[in-house]
Image: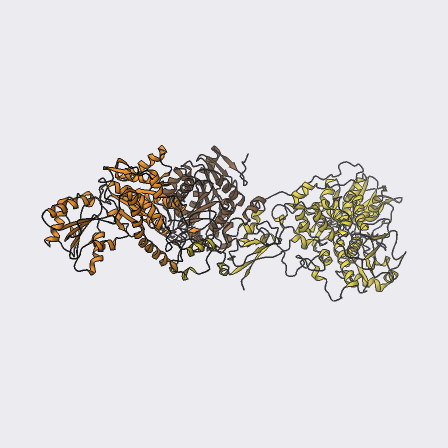
Amino acid sequence: MSVRLEKVALTGNQALAHAVRMAKTQVVAAYPITPQTSVVETIAEFCAKGEMDAHFIQTESEHSSMSACIGASMTGARTFTATSSQGLALMHEMLHWAVGARTPIVLGEVNRALAAPWTILSDQSDSMAQRDTGWMQFYCGNNQEVFDTALLAFKLCEAVLLPAMVVLDAFVLSHSVEGVLLPHQELVNQYLPLRETLAKLDPDEPHAFGGMMFPDVFMEQRFKIEESMDIARGVIMECATEWDALTGRLLKPLHCYHTEDAEYIVMCLGTAFGAAMQAVDQLRSKGIKAGAIRMWQYRPFPTQELIDTIPDTSSLAVVDRAVSFGCGGPVGTETKAIFSGNNQVKVYNYIAGLGGREIRSSSFEKVFSGMMENTASQNKINWLEVRQ
Amino acid sequence: MRKHPEIFSDAALRHIKTGGTKPPGEMTASELPPMAVSWSSTEHLPVGEWKEKAPKYVRGLSPCLTHCPVGNDVEGFVSKVRDNDIETAVKLLLAENPLPATCGRVCYHPCEDGCNRKELDGAVGIRAIERYLGDHPEFKGSDIWQQAKPSSGKKIAVIGSGPSGLACAWGLALLGHKVEVYEQKEKAGGLLRYGIPAYRLPKDVLDREIGRITDVGVKFFYSWKIGEDRIIKDMLAAFDAVFVAAGAVKTRQLGIQGENNNNVWSALDFLNTVANGIIPDIGARCVIIGGGNSAVDAARSARRLGAESTILYRRTCNEMPAHQAEIDDAIAEGVIISELAVPLEFILEDGTLRGVNCLRTRLGEPDSSGRRKPLPVPGSDFAIECESVINALGEMVSSEDLTSNLQLIRAMKTADAWGKSMHPSLFAGGDFTGGERTVAHAIGGGKRAAMAIDRFLLGTKNESLERYRVGGGPASLASYLRSGDSEVTAGGIRTIQFDDLNPAYFPARERAYLEKHLLESRDFEFSEVEPGMNQAQAIEEAERCFSCGRCTKCGLCQIFCPEGAVRKNNKNDLMIFDSHCKGCGICVEECPRCAIEFREES
Amino acid sequence: MNEPQAQTTELLTADHCKTSGGHLACQGCGGALSLRMALQVFGKECVFVIPACCMAVIDGPFPVSSLGVPLMHIAFGATAPTASGIRAGFAAQGKDEILVVGWAGDGATFDIGLGAVSAAADRNDDILYVCYDNEAYMNTGVQQSGATPRAAWTSTSPRQAPKYAAKKDIISIMAAHRIPYIASVSPSHPDDFVRKFQLAKKIKGFRFIHIFSPCPPGQRFEERNTIKIARKAVESRVFPLLEIYNGKKLTLQDIPDPQGLEEYIKLQRRFDHFSTEDRKQFESDINTHWHELHDWAIQSGGLTGENGKRNS
Ligand SMILES: Cc1cc2nc3c(=O)[nH]c(=O)nc-3n(C[C@H](O)[C@H](O)[C@H](O)COP(=O)(O)OP(=O)(O)OC[C@H]3O[C@@H](n4cnc5c(N)ncnc54)[C@H](O)[C@@H]3O)c2cc1C
Ligand SMILES: Cc1ncc(C[n+]2csc(CCOP(=O)(O)OP(=O)(O)O)c2C)c(N)n1
Ligand SMILES: [Mg+2]
């Protein structure tokens, strides 16, 4: 097949919308919220123009968007929604439902901090707060990756019967234009065939879905979700490899920059990675063995990949753009847990970039120096650039 | 993308498609589907164990059944009319009663007095429906004859062809016996022909009914006066059994002066004469003495002959034993009722009747009949002028006319409810044996005697006939014919009262009212007063019937069962599926006709 | 009223599609009964959405289901949008003939799901939304809902702190959305019930059916009286039977001579504590509502008899 690529200037939100269109999504239910709105606006426009043959439902709330997605998905339709922040929080009940119902919904989540106080700017506390729902989560670093991840997510979700969030930072990705290569539709068709379902709402085979379960089976149900998350780790690799073969772009759980020999590593999710790499370059130029990691796959958590990536005797600072008050950053906490038995790897946790505060390369330099000069603490949460 | 067996295994899929046998609590995660998805219905859950009380279909008795002296399956034929199944209705009726056209006109319809509907908006017009069926020209005796039993070779004589004799003859014929009816008059019918006037019971109607009886093989011998032309003793020898239904036809004497005057008639003679088509000369004014049916019929007949007729009665209208509707009609036809008056003597001039001297009465304490006793008011004498007088004091039995054999007389007088006398093959019934003197009672007595005779001839003596009584009351020939209990004759069966019913399903619906053709002028007019119904009217009236106590398969119990536990079996009967019934009792509460009962679970 | 017409009886007693016995409803459950009756009208080509409520329990726990048609359980406030999603999913696959039914309690409809119901109605999504109304949150043990009549007992509106407001007028709320069809039905009136459900099944767009659904344990009456109470509710004007087309044209089954209110109240222990004042207020709430509907009917669709035939 001829692989004809088209480079188009798109915002992250538009890239996401294009992926949804090319995935031949059948039902989209959503509700507007800044900075997600242009995702569904673009989709609504595709539908209106006939460029996309989906049923678009604008609900009265995100709770209902997710409910509608669950309903649609239960018929066997390919289903998408998008939201941010307050919207995601309002969906919380239904996020759990989508997982328990094993509906492979893809959700575009544009990271925005949660109120109060009001803000529309980015941090990751909204999606991080949903990490226990059973949704898979992928944090994108650029608009191309947003597009690629969304297509991968559909394929993945439908294989493992779990929903997934494609997460992108507010404004930095959502509203910034980048060149995005859009594959030919046939290529997408090949990568992502029509959805097939084994159990769905069908009058010819009537079943009740989601009925009450007693303790004798409830835990097995939960175990199966966990098991599916495990299976997903492998499936993600398969999907990524296939996409790589078709497009030459490989999606990886961890994107590493100079980590092989690194003594000091910073790890973040999303677009802050650019600044992190700049800081690494800066330190490397001074002869310091610095490295940086961007975590793309957050759920299922890339435990093995982290163990394999982090060199022994190195120091690792996890920079979280979210906080679980009274405990630490979610990624930091989880990473610490992995290395808790390894006293050669020192793990630090930084909280940074909340509510849209910029994380610059100088910010990361402070993180590196905190590790190098031992001014950072491993035992407490390090609030970066906060006036204390 | 390949399928991941851990997520959705073949075993799990199989369960979903075909239902699982293994309890989910014993299944491994990989055998279980990834989501809560059902694979079986709730049918097997033993929710029936929750109940404390269980509904049961039961047959209750409608009061019309227990009230009917004949033992007609009243609710049965009425509901068949409601279903527009006229043929079955007629057959049900004829199986119990050979004289439906007659009863449909002259019966005092105790069924309607019992009818629960009267508590709501007037009893169902049962008599009119019966008349419609009785008049139906399409049904002959032979139709019902098909249900009859094969010939037994036994021969029974019936004395008297009044309703009692006719009913007995009919019953015996259906039971397979040869019957000979001996009647002193030229035609059959007894008081139906010679007592009840034609404007209430046209003679062609009666002829048709008797025709139906001859249809089934009954032989009639007219102008045979037993006691003169043949004596009972001989008959007892010649027949396997004898049934005496000679009625009560001797008029009670007034016991006052002038009674034997030519213009003083006995009611029965008068009516008999009229019935024979002879117009007696009663002059312009006629006084009728008495307050019973004969008095009223005589007065109305006199009106039809052109006379002014005055009923002289010693109590008030309220106490008159005649049927209220008849009294009302009589008044409407211009009959005068002179209440609280007794005749003292007839005023005669040269042997010509000129009038009656009377005395006023007043009402005293109740007497043994419960009615207030008339006491003469001294000095209240008055006279009524008239050209004729009809004595309608009432009729008496005269067994002496039948036989002078005192032993037989005593035997007959002590006949029981089944007509059995002290003489094993001698039976008696109807007016002749006392009790209530109505056509229906006479028929009931005749029918019971037929059963008793059959039992005497063929059965085991010890077997009680009581089991063929409907709710302990009237006897059912139909179930005797089937020689088994029917639903209505089964023991322990309850009669349904209005309070047992669910009136919610019976919206008010006025009883059919048919305009009567009352006598308007003094023209000679013996045509029928009461009109009959057409089929549509009969059905409409039958639709008013509640069918108390009998499941009509209306389906409400099924509709309203939250469990779907009420089902129909392959015989189309409703049944309650015990393992799903939780015993809520909605079916019991909602059944319009009290055909479901709540019983404690044992 | 009359015994049901033959075709009603035939339909409601047919075996082709109904809940299977063995379900877990309490004795005398008006909701379970209505569900069975409705299913017999719908037939097999339908899909149900049921939120948290008694019906979610009644259908049976995994792996059983009483309904016999596809059923999706969903969260308490999510019935309408889930049904909308199902409709959209089917539409995307060309399965327009399948009837999508949302079947929810009064709590789900009058309260937690009201916004979502409103939105689905506003979009005129092609679903049949049914609210079986037992006038409280029964599944959680009888708490007050927007459908609870004023001063009626519930565990959160005890007699010392009675519910202040009259029952929420859900019919007017729905009518304000100008949806194609609204009807109220009572299982005690099978002819009417069947006729309206049949009609609702045929109409496209958002249809709303409000079922009066007595609950013996929650409203505290003897199980056998379920239908009797439902009937009395209709005959006493407590629960008017009506239809509204496009939010405008209302036809009301006339009750010219209301009866049985006293007995309706007396049969249910949730009204046990009623003082004369409460009783008066209750009646006045009913009358107010009735006269509003009556006036509306006179101005638009008119009054009907029991059979749905227009009164002349
Ligand atoms: C005027 C009148 C009106 C009535 N109206 C009604 C009414 O509207 N509704 C109602 O229910 N009841 C009415 N009755 C009562 C009813 O007619 C009788 O109760 C009923 O006819 C009794 O029937 P039976 O067969 O016992 O006797 P009967 O009808 O009296 O028949 C007896 C038969 O035996 C015959 N017989 C008598 N002796 C001999 C003999 N020695 N040899 C041969 N044959 C003999 C007679 O000729 C007669 O045919 C009325 C009675 C009268 C008098
Ligand atoms: C979001 C949420 N809040 C509360 C509940 C608890 N809950 C379950 S059912 C129910 C009441 C249901 O009442 P209603 O809708 O009237 O149905 P019913 O049980 O009376 O039939 C409640 C409060 C829930 N399941 N979800
Ligand atoms: Mg409720």
Q: Would you say A313 lies left or right of B374 here?
A: left
Is B485 in front, or is B358?
A: B485
Q: Would you say A265 lies left or right of C158 here?
A: left
Give the chain coloured brown. C
Residue A264 coordinates in the image, percent (x, y) = 14, 52
Q: Would you say C78 lies left or right of B141 here?
A: left
Residue A132 coordinates in the image, percent (x, y) = 29, 52
Residue closest to the far front: A1
Is C86 in front, or is A197?
A: A197
Residue B100 visible in the current orientation: yes
Image quadrant where one finds the C terminus of chain B: bottom right
Residue A260 coordinates in the image, percent (x, y) = 18, 52
Residue closest to the far right: B229
Give the chain coloured yellow. B
Q: Would you say A73 lies left or right of B244 here?
A: left
Query: How many numbered discs?
Result: 0
Give the chain coloured orange. A
What coloring was used for the rendering? Answer: by chain
Residue C109 coordinates in the image, percent (x, y) = 40, 45
Is A255 in front, or is A41?
A: A255
Residue A388 visible in the current orientation: no
